[in-house]
Amino acid sequence: MPHSQAASPSIALHRVAIIRGSRVILRDFDLEVESGELIWVRGANGSGKSTLFRALSGLLSVASGEVSISGAIALCDDNLALDLDQPLEKAIRFWTDLDGIEPARLEFALETLDLIGLAELPVRLLSAGQKRRGALARLLASEAPIWLLDEPYNGLDQANVARLDAALSRHTEKGGIALVASHIAPTVNVARSLVIDRPRTEMAA
Ligand SMILES: Nc1ncnc2c1ncn2[C@@H]1O[C@H](COP(=O)(O)OP(=O)(O)OP(=O)(O)O)[C@@H](O)[C@H]1O
């Protein structure tokens, strides 16, 4: 299976602040992640895990601080981003074709998450857990060395939790980075956990 990675992906945040609306979500936030690390991102509901991922993906700007990222990022969150009317494989292929990714890579991602039998089914007919696996297959098929997974285990049965964890393990063994925001622990290779604990009432100046 071909697997291209940035030579050495990394993430470095220094004294980052993120404000949403009038509220400070993260303040003086530091983070350093190196090639091969799987980080379990933890924290209470509303603490800022998704906010952090959206900022790392460039979907939210930071109010202050330094952000240095080496390597492309793939984000898998609650936004399915697959055409509901297309068969699953074709819906994912829309994205992999845009990135010039070879079909074999998509096939491997579908196999990894046991989706070959569902490849021709329109996305809208998939169950919640199957849709989640479809979104994860899109991430697995990408060539991005940095994976951000926001609550990836939601809706997955035990067998698919194990499949995802095995894929995370392979990704980091090959030098990729994975940040997993979850209320349950990944079962493999967690380099460390990052606890997000923000001051809940702080308002932006
Ligand atoms: N568009 C927005 N405007 C203002 N505040 C927002 C906006 N989006 C999110 N927030 C707030 O930002 C805070 C962090 O939300 P976020 O989704 O990052 O939390 P989370 O740690 O991922 O939570 P959960 O565990 O529930 O998924 C929450 O208090 C939320 O209300």
Image (tube, grey):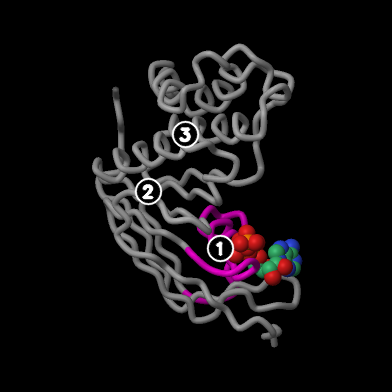
Towards the viewer: 109 or 204: 109
* Image quadrant where one finds the C terminus: bottom right
The residue under label 1 is 49
What residue sits 52% from the left and 36% below the top? 157
Magenta residue check for 117: no
The residue under label 3 is 160
Q: Is residue 61 visible?
A: no
- Estimate the spatial distance between the alpha carbons at disc 3 and disc 1, rounded to whole Å: 23 Å
Q: Earlier in the sequence, mark 2 or mark 3?
A: 2
- Estimate the spatial distance between the alpha carbons at disc 2 and disc 3, rounded to whole Å: 27 Å
Q: Decide: marks 2, 3 in contact (CB < 8 A)?
A: no
The answer to which image quadrant residue 81 occupies is: top right
Q: Is mark 1 within 8 Å of ligand 1?
A: yes
Q: Nearer the viewer, mark 3 or mark 1?
A: 3
- Estimate the spatial distance between the alpha carbons at disc 1 and disc 2, rounded to whole Å: 20 Å
The amino acid on which the numbered mark 3 sits, given as a three-letter code, is Asn
Depicted 115 relative to depicted 25: above or below: above
The answer to which image quadrant residue 170 occupies is: top left
Q: Earlier in the sequence, mark 1 or mark 2?
A: 1
